[in-house]
Image: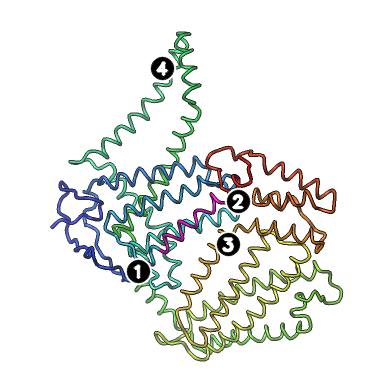
Amino acid sequence: MENNAWLGGQQPQAPEPQGQQPQAPADQEMPLYPPPQAAYRLPDRIALYPLSTAEWLLTAAYTAVGFLFFECRLADGYYAGIGTSLFFLLALASTLVFLIHSNIRQNKVSWLLFSLAAIGSLQYVAYGRQTASIYILGFVFQCSLCLLWLAYSCRTLIALPLTWLLAFDCINQYFIVPFANLPMVFRRLFLKGEDRRGFNLMIVIIALCVSLPVLLLVIRLLESSDEGFSYLMAQIRVIVNLEAFKRWCGNLVLGLPLASCLLGVCFGNVTQHQTQAFKKDSLLGSFASLHRLIHIAALVPLSLFVLVYLVYIAAMSAYLFSAFTAKLPDGFTYAEYARQGFFELIAVTVINTFLLAVLWSVAKREKGTYPATLKAYTAILALLTLVLIITAASKMYLYVQTYNLSILRFYTSCFMFVLAVSYVLLLAWSIRPFNLAKPVISLFIGSFLIITLVSPPAIIANYNSSRYLAGQTINMDVRELQSYGPVALPSLERLADQAPDSHVRAQARDAVASVTELNGHQHWYSWNILYLIMGIY
């Protein structure tokens, strides 16, 4: 019996697929962690199936998503606003409707992932403009969250239960599934058969592309030949706004490759076609084959690292955490002591993480066992690394107390906190092993999502201005606050009214005037709630 539920509708003209497995019953609950096996398999001759009505609607939605990416200038965080949020929400909503129509059921975990992705997309309409580096990082994170939800819903996620294999899922969903499925997408879009909609659409597009330049040439010639027709076309240009029309057409064409990749990743996951580039059993087997390093070869370098860290801590024991109490070693200024060794300590922490990961990957051990000696050394190294993180945190604390917060200092501090919690979890794991990847990955995802939703620039601006007005610091970088955009307006207005330094007051007034000017934000896609609250519109 033919079963094409995954196609979003019945295709009576399609030939009978070979080797298709029956689909899971509709009333069967998806388990908390779905099994890696496919709940339904791809027909062997998928290229013979034209797109269903549901798939055509999804194609139209993804085309609109691709158009929004370029029309709303989503590559530039300066224009972040309702357009960016709409880009993610439209992609999520259309994909969800298609999954439900294709009988792919959602469970509690998939609904949670969908909710997190939807909530994360609201940061743009809430706060608007963002600095370039943070915007790009947040945009990639938001895309990853959407792909994680899609892969989990379609049972194509490798890392189930949640493990370090999630890195291979990212590679698979970003670089393999979309492009590997593009040929299948194009064949089905432009299939010439009983259902000729796709083929006819291709013919119409080609005809338009060929005829429009010729039509424009004809219009120019007719305008030159008759003043009445030229006046009529001038009035039409005033009413229609041909410049905007040409921009829309250009952005639509530019968005088509993105729409094609979205179709590839969605159709690929739904049909589980070209999603098995990495197989869980093969990956685990490959990692297991690496466990050949004898214990003594792992313990000797670990011992050397532990010894060096003990000597380092002993050498600076007199002022190890002195930055918390603002007591400095002789001959150091606040800036010199805060800067000296901070980034080196962070680099050492990252090296320790990499070292432990490599050693546990190659150390000889039986399947499912953790050698006691290696666990003991891991606990010691984790404890010493925590001391290094706290030392670096004390230097950052001193630096912030002296020179206030900045975007870089804020995110570095958050990173150190998450890293410290991760090492606490590693210390607990070395005492009693558990699936460490699950809490650590959840910690990083949750922390980043929270940070994006609370608007760090607003927190930084309020913290810096409050400390300056309270007389706790004499440093006040008004230009940096101005670069944060409208989220810094309350702080800038307070500085303009209350700053004890007349120069700071003048800078703050100029900053308020500059921020409240719409500049590039007159476009609809840059609209955000914060601008509305501030009365800028």
Q: Which residue is mark 2?
A: 130
Q: Which residue is mark 1?
A: 279
Prevailing SS of the magenta stretch? helix
> Which kind of residue does numbered mark 1 sit on?
Lys
Q: Which residue is mark 4?
A: 218
Closer to the eye: label 3 or 4: 3
Q: Are marks 3 and 4 in contact (CB under 8 Å)?
A: no
Start and end of the magenta stretch?
112-127
Q: Are marks 2 and 4 in contact (CB under 8 Å)?
A: no
Q: Secondary structure at mark 2?
A: loop
Looking at the picture, how far across and down is residue 252, in whole percent?
A: 43, 38
Q: Are marks 3 and 1 in contact (CB under 8 Å)?
A: no
Q: Which residue is mark 3?
A: 451
Q: Secondary structure at mark 4?
A: helix
How far apart marks 1 and 4 lie (CA) works out to: 58 Å
Residues 470 and 396: in front is 470
> Which kind of residue does numbered mark 2 sit on?
Gln
Q: Earlier in the sequence, mark 2 or mark 1?
A: 2
How far apart marks 3 and 1 lie (CA) works out to: 34 Å
Q: Is residue 137 above or below residue 384?
A: above
Q: Is residue 290 magenta?
A: no
Image disc number at residue 68 = none
